[in-house]
Image (cartoon, rainbow, N blue to C red):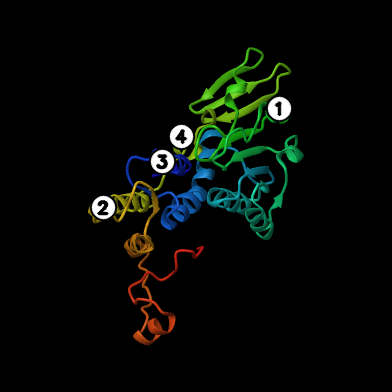
Amino acid sequence: VGSRPLLYQLSKAGKLCVPAMNVNDSVTKQKFDNLYCCRESILDGLKRTTDVMFGGKQVVICGYGEVGKGCCAALKALGAIVYVTEIDPICALQACMDGFRVVKLNEVIRQVDIIITCTGNKNVVTRDQLDRMKNGSIVCNMGHSNTEIDVASLRTPELTWERVRSQVDHVIWPDGKRVILLAEGRLLNLSCSTVPTFVLSITATTQALALIELYNAPEGRYKQDVYLLPKKMDEYVASLHLTTFDAHLTELTDDQAKYLGLNKNGPFKPNYYRY
């Protein structure tokens, strides 16, 4: 299931009617759909809609989770000057160590060319901040929902909306300033780009295995709560897709497995391991 905050809220309130598997936080979903896929689709979506050149552009990425990391890596590789906003000190420190300047959005709002939201939160970019953006700047969302950019605040009589092509609107201020809004604040990678079949295969396999596990589990194993995908299944999903790259896994000897305290067939990492 993708909408994990709602699931956990329902569980906490005792309103969850059935067991639920949190697929969104499985390693294969987080890394491949959120990090590696978004690293490609952010560029694809921006190019398809705006034909923008990234070299030298000042870009602010709101959020440095897996999606934000992918977006930052892609834009940095093409020569963009990338800023990051974060609420979490650990993610913020990661961004610093990866070579990005961590700022508050208000500190750079007047100078940036592109704003990309990747937080899953709401009202990350407000009307006041949109008012201060420069002419021709681009605003788009790569986060979990369509609430990150306060699009509703732009539907007022003093602002004019001009549809220039599919999924691309110019929002025009009374002084003639134009801000380019993509997909009306919805997910850019789903609205303006494509998701590679390889990534869809990984995500669909993860979801299918979660459903099979819930269906086949003996009565009492799963209560009316939210569960993470078992590590063994995450590893199985990954192993199924290694053949695409003609990758060959090294196998532990019996002595090595005993030394590490592992089963030769996995799982190879404890549940607390962070990939």
Q: Earlier in the sequence, mark 4 or mark 2?
A: 4
Mark 1 sits on what residue? Answer: 128
Q: Earlier in the sequence, mark 4 or mark 1?
A: 1
* Distance between mark 2 and mark 3 Cα atoms: 24 Å
Tag 1 and tag 3, C-beta contact below 8 Å: no
- For the point 32% across and 43% down, the residue is 18
Mark 3 sits on what residue? Answer: 14
The kind of residue on which mark 4 rests is: Ser
Q: Earlier in the sequence, mark 2 or mark 3?
A: 3
- For the point 38% across and 44% down, the residue is 1
How many dots with numbers?
4
- For the point 39% across and 52% down, the residue is 227
Tell me if residue 176 comes above or below residue 94 in the rendering: above
Q: Earlier in the sequence, mark 1 or mark 3?
A: 3
Residue 236 image point, x, y percent:
33, 63
Going by the picture, which residue comes out furthest to the bottom?
255
Tag 4 and tag 2, C-beta contact below 8 Å: no
Assign a secondary structure to mark 1.
helix
Going by the picture, which residue comes out furthest to the top?
157
The kind of residue on which mark 2 rests is: Ile
Mark 4 sits on what residue? Answer: 191
